[in-house]
Image (tube, rainbow, N blue to C red):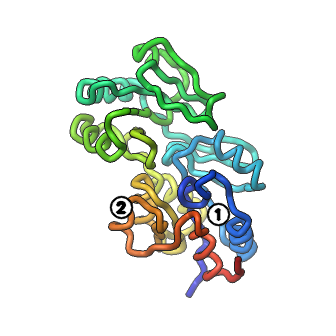
């Protein structure tokens, strides 16, 4: 069996343990793969600022596909290599439609550096508190002059799956809708922006075919890349829709499922 040339991995619920850390076993496995010539690319819903913190803690370098494919980020130089912004007018139309469909829904704009949120968006992430900036009203969201990577929609009444279903009915085909398991959190990108779409462009630039890629993920926003890669691995703790759609499974993130596969392919042990 030919070894993969690129390993694409989601972060939360996949590469990382539930406490947000990268285990020593997984870090050793990644180093083993890199020593054998494989490139490791992080493919995440998270923004670059989160990747920076992880890179500092674990000594990671290389490339990350961030914000569900909206950004390609060079970890070593902390530089956005390419971006696909969500047009503000589109974000406003979608938010207005969802607000009419889902009572009490709140909205925020992710820019890569900050999260601008209006009063109805009451979801707070302790690890991101310094990046969260309030605005007085929903209308004030649309006054920003900073490019937007994602529109975030949050409900304290609906879980992420129910919110996604409501959005698919009410928002039409104007945007890319998904979720990564956040509490009642829907992630909305520009039309056609997915993890797989951005990763495929990155791989084409490196002369890497999809058959030479293995990918790991656990949530609906990972499905495009798990389907696209030559081999996609659903984590043992994955969302039911991911476990049903992806034939190849590995152990859970708490059991170092990514390392388990890499060790089998490249050698090494826990």
Establish if 104 lies above or below 257.
Answer: above
Relative horizontal placement of residue 104, taking residue 127 as reference (left or right):
left
Q: Residue at x 43, y 13 (%)?
A: 137
Number of labels in the image equals 2
For discs 1 and 2, the disc positioned in front in the rendered view: 2
Where residue 164 appears, as percent x and y from the top left, is 31, 43
Q: Residue at x 59, y 29 (%)?
A: 114
Q: Residue at x 64, y 63 (%)?
A: 40
Where residue 41 appears, as percent x and y from the top left, is 61, 59
Give 237 or 138, whichever is nearer the viewer.
237
Q: What secondary structure is marked by label 2?
A: helix
Work out whether mark 1 precedes mark 2 in sequence or the reverse, and give the earlier one.
1
Distance between the alpha carbons at the discs numbered 1 and 2:
26 Å
Q: Which residue is mark 2?
A: 240
Where residue 214 appears, as percent x and y from the top left, is 53, 70
Q: Residue 162: name its quadrant.
A: top left
Q: Which mark is residue 13?
A: none
Mark 2, other Cα within 10 Å: few <14 / some 14–19 / many ≥20:
few
Quadrant for the N terminus, please: bottom right
Q: Which mark is residue 40?
A: 1
Q: What secondary structure is marked by label 1?
A: strand
Q: Residue furthest top?
A: 136
Q: Residue at x 56, y 68 (%)?
A: 208
Mark 1, other Cα within 10 Å: few <14 / some 14–19 / many ≥20:
many
Establish if 212 lies above or below 43.
Answer: below
Relative horizontal placement of residue 28, taking residue 233 as reference (left or right):
right
Establish if 78 lies above or below 236.
Answer: above
Quadrant for the C terminus, please: bottom right
Where residue 231 appears, as percent x and y from the top left, is 47, 73
Q: Residue 153: name its quadrant.
A: top left
């Amino acid at each position: 069996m030919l070894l993969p040339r690129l390993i694409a991995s989601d972060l939360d619920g996949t590469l990382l343990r539930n406490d947000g850390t990268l285990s020593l076993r997984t870090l050793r496995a990644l180093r083993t793969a890199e020593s054998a010539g494989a490139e490791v690319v992080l493919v995440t819903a998270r923004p670059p600022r989160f990747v920076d913190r992880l890179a500092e803690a674990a000594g990671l370098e290389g490339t990350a596909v961030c914000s569900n494919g909206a950004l390609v980020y060079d970890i070593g130089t902390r530089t956005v290599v390419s971006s696909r912004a969500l047009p503000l007018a589109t974000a406003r139309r979608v938010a207005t439609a969802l607000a009419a469909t889902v009572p009490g829904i709140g909205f925020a704009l992710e820019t890569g550096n900050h999260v601008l949120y209006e009063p109805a968006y009451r979801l707070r992430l302790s690890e991101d508190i310094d990046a969260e900036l309030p605005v007085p009203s929903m209308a004030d969201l649309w006054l920003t002059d900073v490019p937007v990577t994602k529109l975030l929609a949050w409900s304290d009444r609906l879980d992420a799956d129910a919110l996604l279903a409501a959005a698919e009915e009410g928002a039409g085909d104007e945007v890319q809708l998904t979720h990564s398991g956040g509490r009642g959190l829907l992630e909305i990108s520009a039309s056609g922006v997915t993890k797989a779409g951005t990763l495929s462009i990155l791989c084409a630039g490196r002369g890497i075919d999809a058959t030479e890629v293995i990918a790991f993920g656990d949530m609906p926003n990972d499905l495009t890349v798990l389907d696209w890669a030559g081999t996609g691995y659903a984590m043992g703790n994955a969302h039911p829709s991911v476990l049903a759609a992806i034939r190849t499974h590995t152990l859970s993130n708490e059991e170092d499922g990514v390392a388990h596969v890499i060790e089998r392919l490249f050698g090494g042990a826990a």
